[in-house]
Image: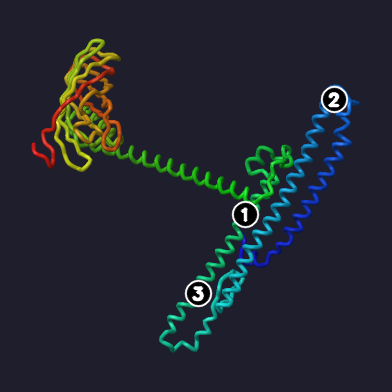
Amino acid sequence: MLTYQDVVTVKLGVLLTAAKDWDDMASGFEDLEALYAAKVEAVANDGGWIGVSAGEASSRFAGTRKQLAHAQTETRAIASLLRDAYQRLSELIGHVKDLVEQAEKDEMSVNSKGEAVYDFSRLTPMRHDPDYPKHMSQAKEAEEAWTQKIKNAVQAVDAEDQIVRGALRKAAGVKGFFGRIRDPLGLDHGFNGAAVGDLETYEKEAKREEAERRAEAEQRKKEAESEDETLKTVLRGITRGLETFNRQPSLDLGSKFVGTAIDGLAEYTGFNNTQGITLSGSLGFGVGVGGDISLVHTRTPDGRSQINLMYSKTATSAGWDVGGSLNVGIVRSNADDISQLKGAGWDKGGSLHAGVGLWGGHQNAIGATNSKGEDVGTFSGGVGLGLGNEISTGFSQADGWTLWEEGKKK
């Protein structure tokens, strides 16, 4: 990074000298190309040399002459960039020096760090004046203001210097870190036939690349935050499930496990808008039928409570369904109004009964979304009496009514 001292002492004339040298180099490459085409490449193309070796030589000679042409493009581009750099840096450095002159006219001196310094001894005769503190404050503010202006101007020079440096590297075809790893000996390097002698072109390209890097960094940050939030949600779900487990000391281990799993899953998925208890029964052999009735509490988007009585019937159409059962369990849903629970649904469920057993299921309400635009779904599970096992999918039809709603009459 350039310092104030670098900016005010630099000799920019060397840029113009270098530009002339690069132009002279381009002329030299031009003469060399013409000589090479006439004295070397012509040997393989004048008809006196024939056969496979002549064809191979002609191809190699053409490649070399092309590199000589690219060398002219690169060297002339670099010469042009150096002249552009001289012009732009001269203006910016001139602005720094103008600011220093203006600060000195405002009774400031500027030190080697580019800091404006006021000679406070000038105010000594005024030390008994009632406005003395005011004058001291104004002088300090003036110091800070001039220092900041000069600092900003120096930073503008440094920023332009970085643009020039990047443009020269790209015009010369200098490889980045990964390019050097792929070709550590530089064997794959040639002259840059696509070099451009315009700083603005490279400046726009650098800004585009920087914008892409920032966008990628922002995306990575969002992904990391999303992963952190997912982990926190999972931990909240586990915690909620363990709390449910501990609140059920009177139930057997299987019942406590089901309650823990459903409550934890509800916390993880956010399926806590609607929750309650359900009674269900099923009967099947290959295909099956079933039904349930549930008493649930629903929290609406505006914070009101609903007590709903729901019932549904289910017909399984795929899977494995043998036996019958009568079950009791808990239910969780992301529905935030009873109307979202009514109508057709797609059910997936499973149970294992040999006397007392476990069951669980999930339902997607077809075509229903909650106030957040999420597809409405329901988890349920519990224990029951029965014989047989079931792993199946099918469709259900649900209906129900509201027994009580906060803010409304029964």
Residue furthest left in the image: 410
Residue drawn 25% across the image and 28% down it? 379
- SS class, disc 2: helix
Mark 3 vs 2, N-terminal side: 2
Please give the residue where the numbered disc 2 appears in the rendered image.
53
Q: Which amino acid type corresponds to the residue marked 1 in the rendered image?
A: Gln
Position in image of residue 189 (x %, y %):
72, 40
Q: Is residue 178 above or below residue 6?
A: above
Residue 355 visible = no
Position in image of residue 108 (x %, y %):
56, 77
Residue 182 visible = yes
Residue drawn 43% across the image and 81% down it? 133
Please give the residue where the numbered disc 3 appears in the rendered image.
142
Numbered label tally: 3
Q: Is residue 402 above or below residue 2?
A: above
Determine crowd level at label 2: few under 14, some 14-19, many 20+ residues with C-alpha closer than 10 A.
few
Residue drawn 19% across the image and 34% down it? 248
Q: Which amino acid type corresponds to the residue marked 3 in the rendered image?
A: Ala
Q: Which amino acid type corresponds to the residue marked 2 in the rendered image?
A: Ser
- SS class, disc 1: helix
